[in-house]
Image (cartoon, rainbow, N blue to C red):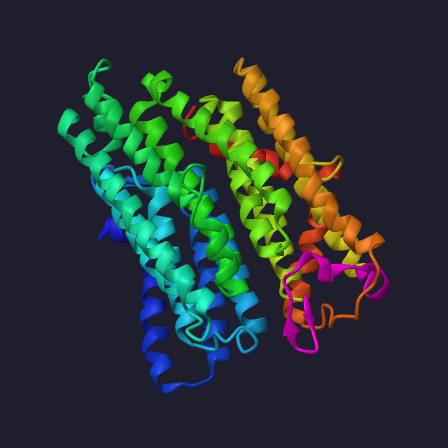
Amino acid sequence: MNSLYFLLPEIFIFIMSVILLMTGLFVKKIKIINYIAILSIVIAVVIILNQSFQSILQNSFIIDEFSKIFKVMILIGSAASLVMFFSSKEDQHINLYEFPILILFSTIGMMVMVSSNDLLLMFIGLELQSLGLYVLAALNRNSLLSSEAGIKYFILGALSSGLLLFGISYIYGFTGNTNFNLIAVNYSEDSLGLIIGIVFVCSGLAFKVSAVPFHMWTPDVYQGAPTPITGFFALAPKIAAMGLLVRFLLNSFGEIYIDWQQILIFISIASMLFAAVAAIAQTNIKRLMAYSSIGHIGYALIGVACVSPEGIKSLTVYLMIYLIMNISVFAFILTMKRNDEYFEQISDMSGLYKNHPLSAIMISLMMFSLAGIPPLAGFFGKFYIFMAAVESNMFVLAIIGIIASVIGAFYYLRIVKVIYFDEPQTSYDGVSIKSLAVLFYPTSLLVVIFCFYPLPLLKIAETASNSFF
């Protein structure tokens, strides 16, 4: 019963999900279900913030500052996706009460992931997250693109789960344990089988964060899925998988980091360079954001590869800034509507500054921030990551990251060029929906405010880092 108390956030969201599932059968007002789902997330955040450090279920489930911070980020991403759904459910043909329920069930899996300290619990959390995501990707049954996205994600997701399980079996076979802390004291450093297990588990997790070479599902799913779902894919699951990757590697194999550090360095470099080059040819804003997310995961992985307090601190700061920037961008994409019809081509944004000057300024700020141009928050996110790499004597990795960032700046600045210098097209509807305005404008301002007052985020990130070092 004592353990159940410390599982209260997860249990509460599960109970609310079941209640909403039953309510949806009788109450046809999706608005009410969505409001309750958002309120449930807010209550869960309050519960998490009031929890203290605890290790339960025979040290398989850990509640520390790291897990609390990542859970709050996950819940913010989920709530933002629900607000996007509320604003566009009918236009996006996803006017289904199951949407918020699937979001909540996936969120439970993500919360379990970042607190997992055991291979089996880690897998349960991953699969609980993935089952909801498979359905969400194909939720618009009237769209061939959405159906294709769902099938691709399901097939490749099943493959990644197989890789993950194969790696788990190797690690268990060579250590005799599934608990991360017990694995750390029961392995042989010269065991080739153990290294194979680590490689396969890292490969399975790399799929979840869409890192190269496990990124192939990302552009198609981002383009095919309805925009609120694409936003959800870009936000919460990536943060959860990064949190799980950090805990798995540092708690289990922190002493032999030389063996797995090389894997992360390769994935990081491949993700940064591939995304920077591949995104240049994109004309669809959602596909471009898919490649953008691949590149940003590459930068974030530098923080993990550093295996240092500064590395985890910079990773946490980067993910918090990434969350804010992507909420703003996807809220803006949902406003790209002309005569009640959505458009997703970058060229359709031409002349935006003449018709909607405030929106043009805000989205331009976001593009500059994503490109890492000072003094916006995106610049500081990359600055902390690269400084962590330099302090860990990983100079080549930092230089490659800077080069990839310079190349990547092209496709962000191209959007600004289209907005301000291309011939104007017919005015689009603009940010007329209040719920989208609540997401778009405040988050756009936060990337500016950060450069004047970064201390709160830095303190939060340092607290997260202290959980491991």
Question: Is residue 29 left or right of 120 when viewed as pictured?
Answer: right
Q: Position of residue 276 (x, y in %)?
A: 60, 37
Q: Position of residue 369 (x, y in %)?
A: 70, 42
x 37%, y 56%: residue: 152
x 16%, y 25%: residue: 175
Magenta stretch: includes residue 341: yes
One can see residue 59 in this view: yes
Vertical arrangement, residue 444 with respect to residue 296, above or below: below
x 51%, y 28%: residue: 269
Please report the bounds of the magenta region as a residue range.
Answer: 336-357
Q: Position of residue 150 (x, y in %)?
A: 38, 61
Magenta stretch: includes residue 54: no
In the rendered picture of this protein, how many numbered marks are placed on residues?
0
Question: Is residue 211 left or right of 193 when viewed as pictured?
Answer: right
Quarter of the image that includes the C terminus: top left
Question: Is residue 3 left or right of 244 when viewed as pictured?
Answer: left
Vertical arrangement, residue 389 with respect to residue 456, above or below: above
Q: Position of residue 448 (x, y in %)?
A: 74, 44
Vertical arrangement, residue 109 with respect to residue 424, above or below: above
Residue in front for this viewpoint, 67 or 279: 279
Residue in front for this viewpoint, 167 or 390: 167
Location of residue 264 by image quarter: top left
Residue in front for this viewpoint, 451 or 239: 239
Instruction: Point out the residue furthest to the front here.
Output: 281
